[in-house]
Amino acid sequence: MTALDSSFKAPDNPNTANIVLGIETSCDETAAAVVSGPCDVLSSVISSQVDLHARYGGVVPEIASRAHVEMLTPVVAQAVIEAGLGNHEVEAVAATAGPGLVGALLVGVSAAKSLALVWDVPFVAVNHLEAHLYSSFLEEPDLELPVVVLLVSGGHTLLVLMEEFGRYRLIGQTLDDAAGEAFDKVARFMDLGYPGGPVIDRLSMTGDPEAVAFPRPMHNDGYDFSFSGLKTAVVNYVRSRSDFDVADVAASFQEAVVDVLVHKAGKAARELGAKGLCLAGGVAANSSLRERILDACVASGISGFLPSRSMCTDNAAMVAAAGWQRLRLDGPSPLDTGADPNLPLPFDT
Ligand code: KG4
Ligand code: ZN
């Protein structure tokens, strides 16, 4: 890492920092990135812990926290070096403060506050969900607002109308399991490995999506989602048969999830007069979802934007981008800000 120099002074106006270091440790990725201005990514480094958790079939919080402690310093150092920054050119440090695993969050928040103190620059606490909303803008800065964002991850499934930067309206959310959670649970039940989403995505390419008519929960029922019954339908189907084609079951399950997501996201974008529809979150890496959402956008004459797969899953560039906006809107966060595992996304009512 670049040497520390306590003589460095923050910009006069603490709300105008341009070069933001982002830190992400909310779950099982240790990530750091440097972003210049609202969306110019100078570096983005991600160290995944997936191999550490795979044998347990899910993220083990204690293992995640320890791995973040080990990996964060080299990951931050690499991000600063790859950004080509000289000493002390970071003008603010942003870190995910929630929602997420509390021990994991604390590692990133503590590190970010320490760096901000030593470098004498502002610290910004970032909401992980808000950060996901910015991933599309990092790759497509000219996206016109308002946009509907379908945020589908391991912990959340939200439909959000982004009216302005910092102003969001909640349109719908899951009433039980998140979409990614359903992928992970179905994969675990069928012994396919962890994380389940990418495995089911791959398997589905060789399966028949119409082989099994799984339910489309709440398909015509407002903007909320429910995936727990669909997961149970898959479990019941598998249990009731001695032989079945795993790829067909995977493809049929994926098709049911994607049908509901695409239907509701497209409907929301049309009915709310959005100029565009974006995907965010780990499930946004799903091949079928990506293809079908673009088809739906073309059919409705709405512009669709899909962040690259590495920008969909957890990364720190989106944290730096959200930090840049939060600093501009609210100023720095106090240094006694803690980690909040249930931090809600602030919605306009
Ligand atoms: O956003 P993310 O990286 O972490 C959270 O904040 O949750 O999302 C992780 C989730 C996991 O449930 C994983 O199975 C799912 O995203 N996922 C996928 C795919 N890649 C990751 N789900 C479906 N298809 C994929 N290709
Ligand atoms: Zn996430």
Image (tube, rainbow, N blue to C red):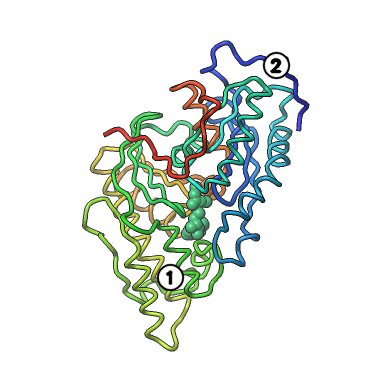
Q: Quadrant of the C terminus?
A: top left
Q: Does the residue labelled 2 lie within 8 Å of ligand 2?
A: no
Q: In which quarter of the image is the N terminus?
A: top right
Image x and y of residue 97, in percent: 51, 38
Image x and y of residue 5, in percent: 75, 20
Image x and y of residue 69, in percent: 67, 45
Instruction: Tell me the quarter of the picture where residue 14 sits.
Output: top right
Q: Do the residues labelled 1 and 2 touch (CB within 8 Å)?
A: no
Residue 28: image tag: none
The residue positioned farthest toward the left in the image shown: 221
- Number of numbered tags placed on the structure image: 2
On the image, numbered disc 2 is attached to which residue? 8
Image x and y of residue 204, in percent: 47, 69
Specify whether 320 is left or right of 164. right
The residue drawn where x is 51% and y is 25% is: 333
202 or 11, which lies in front?
11
Which amino acid type is shown beneath numbered disc 2?
Answer: Phe
178 to 106, vertically: above or below: below
Which amino acid type is shown beneath numbered disc 1?
Answer: Ala
The residue drawn where x is 65% and y is 19% is: 120
The residue drawn where x is 49% and y is 67% is: 200
On the image, numbered disc 1 is attached to which residue? 251
- Mark 2 packing: few (<14 Cα in 10 Å), some, or many (20+)? some
Foreground mark, 1 or 2, reads 2
Q: Is mark 1 on a helix, strand or loop?
A: helix
Instruction: Tell me the quarter of the picture where residue 13 sits.
Output: top right
The residue positioned farthest toward the right in the image shown: 3
102 or 18, which lies in front?
102
* Viewer can see residue 285: no
9 to 236, vertically: above or below: above
Instruction: Tell me the quarter of the picture where residue 32 sits.
Output: top right
